[in-house]
């Protein structure tokens, strides 16, 4: 209900934890902000707005506001940034929700890197999402697995490859995306071919999935 209430809640949880707690939140910016302006939390522009501007220093500055807020609240993991390519403007959960920085992988990488840098400097970790790419889908994976077999492109792996190679990928969230070209039995979240074969072995990611 307010920054003070969230701060007290997180502090009380940490007191009772036998181990240091990971406290996570979806605070991407734009529409996806669990801590909202009307409750007294600072807003952040959507990924689409930041990508259109494509100013790394500006993105780092505005992301720092979010990262400082999370640190001050005791939240240490942000389930962001989205690194999906904006391949389908009618995508109900990415394109239409302004959650992608761009359809251009290089822009996505630049913007994500600035977002992550700001969080790291405040001691907050980030999660790349939604592997192996949700930007081309025409459905909403919150409601069940979505088939992207005919829509998905290997280009959607590019942001992950670049951010893993540069050491900017700390954790990766999978998507309930079904792609028969990658695994004809399971969606990505349950797929050894996708998570082990592509994310770990081909792209070399050894962090948290």
Image: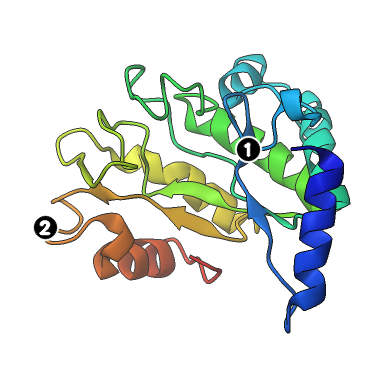
Q: On residue 34, which mark appears?
A: 1
Q: Nearer the viewer, residue 91 or 118?
A: 91
Residue drawn where x is 40% and y is 62% of the image: 199
Which residue in the protein does label 2 denote? 184
Give the percent coordinates (x, y) of residue 169: 60, 56
Asked if the residue under mark 2 is in contact with the one under mark 1, i.e. CB atoms within 8 Å, the reply is no
In whole angstroms, how far apart are the C-alphas of marks 1 and 2?
A: 35 Å
Q: Nearer the viewer, residue 53 or 174?
A: 174
Residue drawn where x is 81% and y is 29% of the image: 40
Rendering quarter of residue 29: top right
Residue drawn where x is 26% and y is 32% of the image: 139
Give the percent coordinates (x, y) of residue 140: 30, 35
Left or right: residue 11 versus residue 126 is right
Dot 1 alpha-carbon crowd within 10 angstroms: few under 14, some 14 to 19, many 20 or more:
few
* Sequence-wise first label, 1 or 2: 1
Rendering quarter of residue 62: top right
**Vertical position of residue 176 compared to residue 97: above or below:** below
């Amino acid at each position: 209900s307010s920054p003070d209430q969230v701060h007290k809640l997180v502090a009380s949880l940490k007191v009772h934890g036998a181990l240091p707690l990971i406290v996570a939140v979806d605070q991407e910016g734009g529409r996806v902000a669990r801590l909202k302006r009307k409750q007294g939390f600072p807003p952040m522009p959507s990924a689409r707005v930041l990508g259109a501007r494509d100013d790394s220093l500006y993105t780092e500055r505005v992301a720092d506001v979010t990262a400082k807020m999370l640190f001050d609240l005791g939240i240490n993991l942000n389930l962001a940034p989205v690194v999906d390519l904006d391949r389908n403007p009618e995508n109900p959960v990415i394109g239409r929700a302004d959650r992608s920085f761009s359809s251009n992988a290089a822009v996505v990488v630049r913007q994500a890197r600035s977002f992550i840098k700001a969080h790291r400097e405040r001691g907050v970790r980030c999660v790349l999402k939604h592997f192996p790419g949700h930007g081309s889908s025409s459905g909403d994976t919150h409601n069940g697995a979505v088939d992207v077999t005919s829509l998905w492109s290997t280009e959607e792996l590019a942001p992950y490859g670049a951010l893993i190679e540069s050491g900017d990928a700390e954790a990766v969230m999978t998507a309930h995306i079904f792609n028969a070209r990658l695994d004809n039995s399971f969606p990505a979240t349950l797929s050894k071919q996708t998570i082990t074969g592509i994310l770990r072995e081909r792209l070399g990611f050894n962090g948290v999935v």
